[in-house]
Image (cartoon, rainbow, N blue to C red):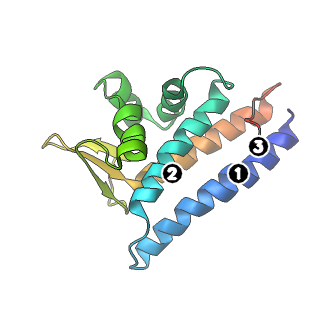
Amino acid sequence: MNNQEVKRYFNEYVFGFIKGDIQREINLARSGDSGGNFLAALGLLCYTEFMGTMILRGKGSKTDRFNAFFRLMGDDYKQLLDVKRVNVYRIFRCGMAHTYFAQNCDIKMLNNNYPAGIILKSDGKYLFIVEKYFEDFMNACSRLYNDMIVEQNPYLPST
């Protein structure tokens, strides 16, 4: 792979399809329509695993891939995994994908100055904020993209 292939891949899949799909749902919610809060949340969690594939170069378990990119999203995300010892992959990604629910979690579409896209509230329940998670996700995508542009032999999943 070379940097032109990285640019094409990210522009089409990450900054094109992924960003466009989630942004459309946020825009719907901002306009007063409901927007697909559950589908957007599930998509972001699946995309987190997908992006981790590039960090781990196709190696590691699905959980490892997810966690690798999740940590790249910022300190609040790292703390959920490393300090609070939350199994984010199992609770959120698998919970939403396989049982339709993330354990003990509410989903909110729009951000009202939350510090992260997943927070643990004082009552012990989680809150998943689609818009904030998306913002942090896209920032991490941009950081990974910039790193991969200068990398000698970047890894891209096959399409």
Q: Depth check: 49 or 96 in front?
A: 96
- Tell me, for residue 13, which label it has, or none: 1
Q: What is the secondary structure assignment of the residue under circle 3? A: loop
Earlier-in-chain disc, 3 versus 2: 2
Q: What residue type is labelled 2?
A: Gly
Q: What residue sits right under mark 2 in the picture? A: 43
Residue 148: x, y in percent?
Answer: 74, 33
The amino acid type, in three-letter code, at marker 1 is: Tyr
Provide the residue designation for mark 3. 159
Which quadrant holds residue 78? top left
Marks 1 and 3: in contact by CB < 8 Å?
yes
Q: Label 3 to label 2, Cα distance in Å?
A: 18 Å
CA separation in Å, label 3 and label 1: 10 Å
* Residue 106 percent across, percent down from the top left: 26, 53
Q: Is mark 1 on a helix, strand or loop?
A: helix
Q: Residue at x 45, y 36 (%)?
A: 74
Label 2 sits on a secondary structure element that is: helix
Which of the marked residues, 2 or 1, is nearer the chain's N terminus?
Answer: 1
Q: Mark 1 and mark 2 in contact (Cβ < 8 Å)?
A: no
Residue 20 image position (x, y, % from top left): 61, 62
Q: Pointer 1: residues within 10 angstroms few (<14), some, or many (20+)?
A: few
Q: Name the residue located 31 percent from the left edge and 44 percent from the top edge.
A: 102
Out of 21 and 140, give the one closest to the viewer. 21
Residue drawn at point x = 14 percent, y = 42 percent: 122
